[in-house]
């Protein structure tokens, strides 16, 4: 039987997650160059892209996506990167994610999708962007 403490350590986020969360672009780039898994799951937000998106780090999102991060990965507090960026009012990140094929109608999170999260939190510019990219204005929570 694996001790509880060991299992919890195994589920801790990796350095790429924390540097993405903290906005440390040069360190993110270096970690990716050294082979860090851009889709590794772990942490409050789910993965490095979701952490960068939640905190508004558009340049880091671009780096991660250019290295193969899944724009539609599910997990964490906001369920997906587009929801995280939309809920927190990060329009630059929303634009980056949508340019890399993020699903504008992906389900998940407290408000069920990015459009509802942006609408509820008063992020009008993001609402306009999501609608222009085909967000379902009639989606229910």
Image: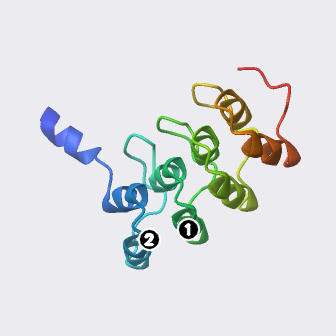
Query: On the picture, is 18 further left or further right than 110?
Result: left
Which secondary structure, mark 1?
helix
Query: On the picture, is 31 further left or further right than 140?
Result: left
Confirm whether residue 46 shows in the render: yes
The picture places residue 30, in percent across and down from the top left corner, at 38, 78
Query: On the picture, is 10 further left or further right than 40?
Result: left
Furthest toward the top, the residue is 141
Mark 2, Cα crowd under 10 Å, few <14 / some 14-19 / many 20+, is some
The residue singled out by tag 1 in the image is: 59
The picture places residue 24, in percent across and down from the top left corner, at 39, 67
The residue singled out by tag 2 in the image is: 25
Q: Residue at x 55, y 68 (%)?
A: 59
Q: Quadrant of residue 137?
A: top right
Q: Residue at x 73, y 35 (%)?
A: 115
Q: Which residue is drawn at 77% across and 40% down?
A: 127
Q: Which mark is residue 1?
A: none
The picture places residue 84, in percent across and down from the top left corner, at 57, 42
Q: Are marks 1 and 2 in contact (CB under 8 Å)?
A: yes
Query: On the picture, is 49 further left or further right than 20?
Result: right
Mark 1, Cα crowd under 10 Å, few <14 / some 14-19 / many 20+, is some
């Amino acid at each position: 039987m694996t001790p509880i403490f060991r299992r919890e350590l195994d589920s801790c986020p990796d350095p790429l997650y924390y540097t993405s969360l903290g906005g440390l672009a040069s360190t993110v780039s270096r970690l990716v160059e050294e082979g860090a898994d851009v889709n590794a799951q772990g942490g409050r937000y789910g993965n490095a892209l979701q952490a960068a998106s939640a905190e508004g780090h558009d340049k880091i999102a671009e780096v991660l996506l250019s290295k193969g991060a899944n724009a539609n990965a599910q997990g964490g507090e906001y369920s997906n990167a587009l929801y995280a960026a939309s809920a927190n009012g990060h329009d630059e990140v929303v634009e980056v994610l949508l340019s890399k094929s993020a699903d504008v109608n992906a389900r998940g999170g407290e408000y069920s999708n990015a459009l509802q999260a942006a609408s509820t939190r008063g992020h009008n510019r993001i609402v306009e962007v999501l609608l222009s990219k085909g967000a379902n204005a009639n989606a229910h929570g």
